[in-house]
Image: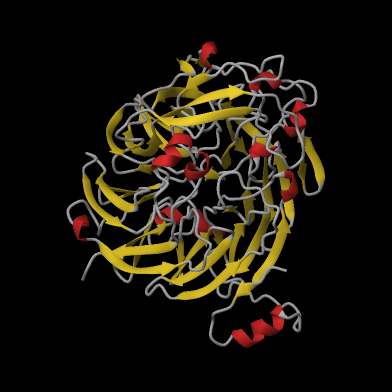
Amino acid sequence: MTKAKWLNTGLVAGAALWMAGALPAMAQAPATGPMDADIMNDEATPGDVLTYGMGHKGQRFSPLDKIHAGNVKSLVPAFTASLGGEKQRGQESQPLVYDGTIYVTGSYSRVFAFDSRTGAEKWQYDARLPDGIMPCCDVVNRGAAIHGDKIIFGTLDAHLIALNRNTGRVIWNKTMADYSAGYSFTAAPMIINGKVIYGNSGGEFGVVGKVEARDVETGELIWSRPTIEGHMGSLKGADNGITGTTNASWQGDQWKNGGGATWLGGTYDPDTNLIYMGTGNPSPWNSHLRPGNNLYTASTLAIDPDTGVIKWHYQTTPHDGWDFDGVNEFIPFDHTVNGKVMKLGAKADRNGFFFVLDRTNGKFVSATPFVSKVTWASGYDKAGKPITIPANRPGAPNADGTKGTVVFAAPSFLGGKNWMPMAYSKQTSMFYVPSNEWGMDIWNEPIAYKKGAAYLGAGFTIKPLYDDHIGVLRAIDPATGKIAWEYKNKAPLWGGVLATGGNLVFTGTPEGYLKAFDAKTGTELWKFNTGSGVVGTPVTWEQDGEQYVAVMSGWGGAVPLWGGEVAKSVQNINQGGMLWVFKMPK
């Protein structure tokens, strides 16, 4: 059984008895804390942060303006809090803030509760992970969900756990999938009308992507929707229709290990009552082994939150051969076109294109490159289909089993933009996209599926495109796709973005800085070095009449593990594990 580290005065003795098995499980008191309506209204309540994305739409915009472009240069640390121990690695979490407490997840499936005024630790929970976990891209966790008396998060061995938010004690613990087959979990769940909505990780191991919903009070499964055609969905224990049409875009039994992991979670739009969930790469990477479009990989799916039925889909990279996962967040926003308010959504995809769709039906609106070099396609036609460049697809393995033709492709498989969430400012009507300029030599190799083994059938070496920078923060006008400004960074950008009503944009860098930019011009206005790479996502809230900004610091993630020549350029960055909180001096 997984145990919590108990730090609350008055609870230690009882906790010790419970941990020793001497006490039965305690009856749960009535839930107190943010409920469905509070969570749904998160983006309009700047006194807390109740959702991953600072609102279910994931816009990551706060109207707060006490910290603004004119005074941000005076921003100073209020306090720091350490995650402690030897468990460093990447700290990609986004904090939640409620009722005087900051909740963050840490590497190796840990959860911490800190006092939001002093940084004092209230409790810590460490999941007991088995030896055989297989996370592809570091032992990260990107955040938790809050509902009533619960903090809910997922673990690297594919469990979903609800903790008491006041004590850190386990309320329920459910197995999502079999970690020995390569399944894991790193994303933040979301709560929609009493349901915990989540996806899965493991696309490099031939898993099958799913989106599922569980009862927030009990953890019991309500519905399950596989993302690969041919697999059966379920609703309240009964079959609920096959995803797509079996063998429509896959041959033979390839769909049984087809990938399409939903490893980044999703967004939700109350206007349409739809979940928007991105899907990952098809398995294996070697596209010559799986002819067809391989639905519904490398796509955005619109899903009914009550039934798990797919209402529409849009595939950004049909028959993907470059590991261009389509998991990146699809952010709903409204925009006036020819005098009519349109319900749109935007996504900066791994494949280097910035997409705008009609979020009510998935109809294609536009796709424009947001990085300097895209080699796999020249653009998209009016129907929203990519105009691919066949010569840039890596060749099939040779008959003698040697690797196929090597091609140089851009962006690299780590993407024009990877997991790190962009922000949308209601003040400027622009998206702020953390992007990277890199390419890769990529080739295909023979491969066969084996449970729990990597299922790639490809090799690669990532290379920077330019000597002076890799990371670029870009402000993009979704109406035109044009870049309004950009900030270039020597190392890759691997952290999320926050926009505020103070005409500010915040993001972090691997060099350790949290930085603030003028949202309209891109001028760098402030920076602070946190001592380790910033790959977390900043948030802001108001407390006791003051505005605060918080971010996790701790270098890691996929870049030092998969980054080839790029990894060498960041090999001397120190790891860490700290929560940094800032405010204006009095």
Viewer-nearest residue: 155 or 32: 155
Q: Which residue is drawn at 59% across and 69% down?
A: 125
Q: In this view, does 274 lie to the left or right of 522?
A: right
Q: Where's residue 567, x and y in %?
A: 45, 41
Viewer-nearest residue: 249 or 487: 487
Residue 306 seen: yes
Q: Where's residue 282, x and y in %?
A: 65, 30
Viewer-nearest residue: 152 or 509: 509
Image quadrant in which the C terminus is located: bottom left
Q: Where's residue 491, x and y in %?
A: 36, 41
Tally of numbered tags: 0
Image quadrant in which the N terminus is located: bottom right
Residue 218 seen: no
Q: Which residue is drawn at 59% across and 59% down?
A: 109
Q: Is residue 474 left or right of residue 358?
A: left
Name the image colouring. secondary structure
Q: Which residue is drawn at 34% across and 49% down?
A: 511
Farthest residue in the right direction? 238
| Rendered image quadrant of residue 215 | bottom right
Q: Identify whether 301 is placed above or below 195.
A: above
Q: Where's residue 482, x and y in %?
A: 32, 26
